[in-house]
Image (cartoon, coloured by chain):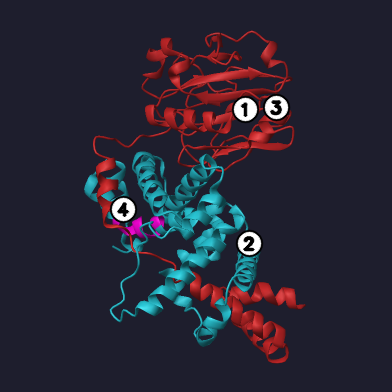
Chain colours: A red, B cyan
Amino acid sequence: MNCEDYGVLMNMVIDGEASPEDEWLLSEHLKVCRACRDEYARLNAVALQMRQMQEDVPECLHSRIMSGIKGKKPVRIPMIRVKTIAMVAAACLVIAAAGVFMPSMSNFFATKDDVFAEANYSGSNAVDSAPQSPTSIEKYYAADGDYGYIAEKNNSDNAQPSDDSADSSDGSDPSKPDKVDSATTSGHFVQSGVYVLEGNGVLPAQLDAYQPVYLNGEVVFCFDDAGQAKIAYSALVDNGFSKLSEYQLSDECMKLAGQCQTAVIVILK
Amino acid sequence: MKIALIGTDIVARAQKGDHDAFEQIVTAFEKKVYNMALRYTNDPEDALDISQEVFLRVYRFLPNYKGNSTLSTWIYRITMNVCHDTAGKKSNLNELSLDAGDDDEKPITEISDVRFDPEKEFERKQTKELIARGIALLDSEQRDAIIMRDINGMSYDEIADVLGLSQGTVKSRIFRAREKLKNFLIKNGNFFEEMQSNYNEEPRKEDRRR
């Protein structure tokens, strides 16, 4: 071990993260290395001072927090299940966005199982294929001139999951009515609070918190378990989505999380 | 209330909108959330706003918390998200942070000391401001890690969980953050000379679980 290696070890010892063997190793080294002894003393001083930086909470904070939630209700954001790995020839962006884009779908949003949308794509030429019944896809234009498609929910109660759409990774029973992703047709499946990007990559079988989504091998976004998307803006720009900005998307995501309204936007590259 | 005392029953009640249960969660976490925000922004007003936003999100999204991670991990993750959002909106965060450290009019909450000594109090405040400036100069990634470690006393495992990193990466970020802070302090003032008397007073390991 060189002195830099001992630097990492010093921090681990300071933080109580080192094993007794490592502590012994460091102490032996410090006996013979004055430079590291000085370094250890300085790092200790920094850590000690840092730990004295904690402040008392201002008295007003607690009441501000509690008054801030008055009249608000917790919301449940259905988690996404991507039923199949659908490869789309042209890179496309599927975004769950606020219902403002699709006011006519208010009835659709009110469905009991909270399924927001289903894009019935399958196969490599899915975008060019006509959507299969009973799912319908409508074209729309967003305010910034981009166009996209709204995929409506398949309302057929008799629809069965296709072989490749079975998803029991969480051990749940897909036939239960409280599962929002139950009884769907094949195709990828998008719900509230989630951005899904599909390109020359592979959609994961199940999207979950902090699971990155790739486009052309680059992480474009992931979302956290509070329903907030993390978007790599540069990745969007590099892939031709220059009209999208991080905060527009993030705000939209938060809005839909709060209102439980969503639509699916597919922006073709 | 201590964080460890937030049981699943309290969480379950809060998930259904029980304000009393939620208030227990707030009481358990508000200090850590506030301090994370304060050290991230170095601005008490921003820290208040961030803390309020964090708990609003916690309240609203609590039904989505399924216990896959600890409640503290989940709340700190949200805290970091809100901190980053705030920093993103303030593109000149570092500049603001450095200014904030020089602004004597900003309300800085001090821990009361029964043995109040004006001179020592002044020195302590200066040291805090210096450290705060040093923290503001860290890379965002290093700042996340060192704040969680030193301000909130979280273990490497917990930090790795919140940030979605390996423990090795956390170690490396903490190492680099302390190195950078140390070099900043060497270049700015006589911090280490003043700290000489404290060299033998190592941070207590049990501080990790404050």
User: Could you tell me how far apart the alpha carbons at marks 4 and 2 are, in whole angstroms?
Assistant: 29 Å
User: Could you tell me how far apart the alpha carbons at marks 4 and 3 are, in whole angstroms?
Assistant: 42 Å
User: Could you tell me how far apart the alpha carbons at marks 1 and 2 are, in whole angstroms?
Assistant: 38 Å
Choose top left, top right, bottom left or bottom right for residue A210.
Answer: top right
Proximity of marks 1 and 4: CB atoms separated by less than 8 Å: no
What's the mark number on residue A84?
1
Q: Amino acid at mark 1?
A: Thr
User: Could you tell me how far apart the alpha carbons at marks 1 and 4 are, in whole angstroms?
Assistant: 40 Å
Q: Position of residue A176 (x, y in %)?
A: 41, 30
What's the mark number on residue A199?
3
User: Under tag 4, what secondary structure?
Assistant: helix
Q: Which residue is mark 2?
A: B173
Subunit under mark 1? A
**Quadrant location of the N terminus of chain B in the rendered image:** bottom left
Q: Residue shown at 60%/54% (left/top)? A: B141
Subunit under mark 2? B
Q: Neighbour class for label 3 at 10 Å: few (<14), some, many (≥20)?
A: many
Same subunit under labels 1 and 2?
no
Same subunit under labels 2 and 3?
no
* Magenta region includes residue B3: no
Residue A241 sits above or below residue B137 on the image:
above
User: Under tag 3, what secondary structure?
Assistant: loop
